[in-house]
Amino acid sequence: IIALVAVTAAFAVWKFWPEPVEPLDPPAVLTQKLESAPAEQKVIAAHDLIRHGPAARVEVRSALSQHQRYEPEVVAPLVQATMKNRDYRSMPTLFELLEHEDPVVRGRAGAAVQKILGANFEFQANAPPEERRRVIELMKSDYQQAQGRFSEVYGSQN
């Protein structure tokens, strides 16, 4: 019985022991990689910024504001990080990205705007441009009305 318990315990420890997590580079290092690393490492750096959460809010906001410099594979995770952080200060950039040429970027920007505003506008990244523009105008109108309450809801964001 003791041997069976020991084997079962060993199996449970082996099966459920968490995988070691690679340490993250600091947000400043990751943003440097966005500027100078090869394309594949830029994508990894953008995904790592998501893992930093609010600690990387300023760096993500800065990188996202320069989205024209990056491939869609880099912009999409930056938008995802913005959504995760509910960074309302990035809303003007998110509105730009609602009209991005890449539908994945448009879709993530739509999800981010909706999450930050706390409303479902049923934005569809693959909808015809006229329909997207109509929904974007509704989103912008809601944003203008809610702008003064963001700091109350989300707190001060540096």
Image (cartoon, rainbow, N blue to C red):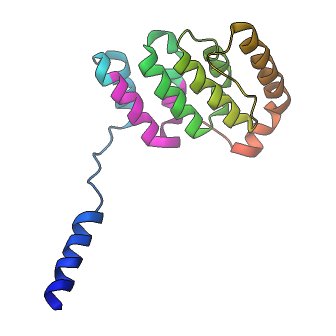
Give x and y (percent) for residue 1.
Answer: 18, 91
The residue at 45%/10% (across/down) is 69
Give x and y (percent) for residue 128.
Answer: 69, 10
The residue at 56%/32% (across/down) is 82
In the rendered image, the vertical position of residue 9 relative to residue 134, given as above or below: below
Quadrant of residue 101 within the rendered picture? top right
Q: Is residue 12 left or right of residue 147?
A: left
Q: Is residue 39 left or right of residue 101?
A: left
Single out the residue that lies furthest toward the bottom. 1
Quadrant of residue 83 within the rendered picture? top right
- Name the residue nearer the viewer: 40 or 107: 107
Q: Is residue 8 magenta?
A: no
Single out the residue that lies furthest toward the right. 145
Which residues fall within the magenta stretch?
Answer: 42-61
Give x and y (percent) for residue 97.
Answer: 60, 16
Characterize the magenta stretch by its predominant secondary structure.
Answer: helix
- Name the residue nearer the viewer: 150 or 50: 50
Q: Is residue 63 left or right of residue 36?
A: right
The number of numbered badges drawn on the structure is 0
